[in-house]
């Protein structure tokens, strides 16, 4: 399988999960219902792509192109909404 195909399948799977975050969070009626700086898709991609740096540096790397960078505690709060499975 080529790298482009793997990335396509990876992004497709993340998009599918992000379209229905209520199936993967602790409080489906409240979690990921509002538009925030960090979406469910951003959290999932961020956790999967972490490289072992400090969380602050990971957040900077994830949102380096964004003019409105979220804080590390904001990322933690969003991450804590997701079930570990």
Image (cartoon, rainbow, N blue to C red):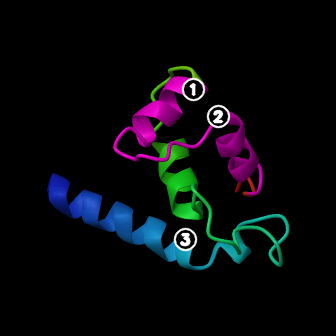
**Which image quarter holds the C terminus?**
bottom right
Q: Who's the residue at 36% across and 61% down the image? A: 10
The residue that label 3 is drawn on is 18
Task: Give residue 20's position: percent from left, percent from top.
Answer: 61, 79
In this image, 17 relative to 76: left or right?
A: left
Label located before the other in sequence (3 or 1): 3
**Residue 36 included in the magenta stretch of the image:** no
Q: Who's the residue at 20% across and 63% down the image? A: 5
- Please tell me whether residue 37 is drawn above or below residue 50 in the rendered image: below
Answer whether residue 1 is visible to the viewer in this image.
no
The residue that label 2 is drawn on is 72
**Residue 65 included in the magenta stretch of the image:** yes
Disc sitting over residue 56 in the figure: 1
Label located before the other in sequence (1 or 2): 1
Crowd around label 2: few <14 · some 14–19 · many ≥20 (10 Å): some
How many callouts does the rendering have? 3
Q: Who's the residue at 34% across and 44% down the image? A: 65
Task: Give residue 58's position: percent from left, percent from top.
Answer: 50, 31
Q: Using the rendered view, name the quadrant where residue 39 is placed.
A: bottom right
Marks 2 and 3 sit apart, C-alpha to C-alpha, by 21 Å
In this image, 40 relative to 64: left or right?
A: right
Task: Give residue 25's position: percent from left, percent from top.
Answer: 76, 65
Q: Is mark 3 on a helix, strand or loop?
A: helix
Label located before the other in sequence (2 or 3): 3
The answer to the question of whether label 1 and label 2 lie on touching residues, with beta carbons closer than 8 A, is yes
Crowd around label 3: few <14 · some 14–19 · many ≥20 (10 Å): some
Q: What element carries label 2?
A: helix
């Amino acid at each position: 399988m080529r790298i482009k195909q793997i990335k396509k399948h990876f992004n497709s799977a993340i998009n599918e999960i992000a379209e229905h975050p209520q199936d993967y969070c602790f409080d489906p009626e409240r979690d990921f219902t509002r538009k925030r700086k960090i979406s469910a898709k951003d959290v999932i991609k961020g956790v999967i792509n972490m490289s072992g740096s400090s969380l602050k540096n990971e957040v900077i790397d994830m949102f380096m192109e964004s003019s409105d960078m979220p804080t590390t505690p904001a990322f933690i709060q969003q991450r804590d909404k997701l079930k570990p499975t």
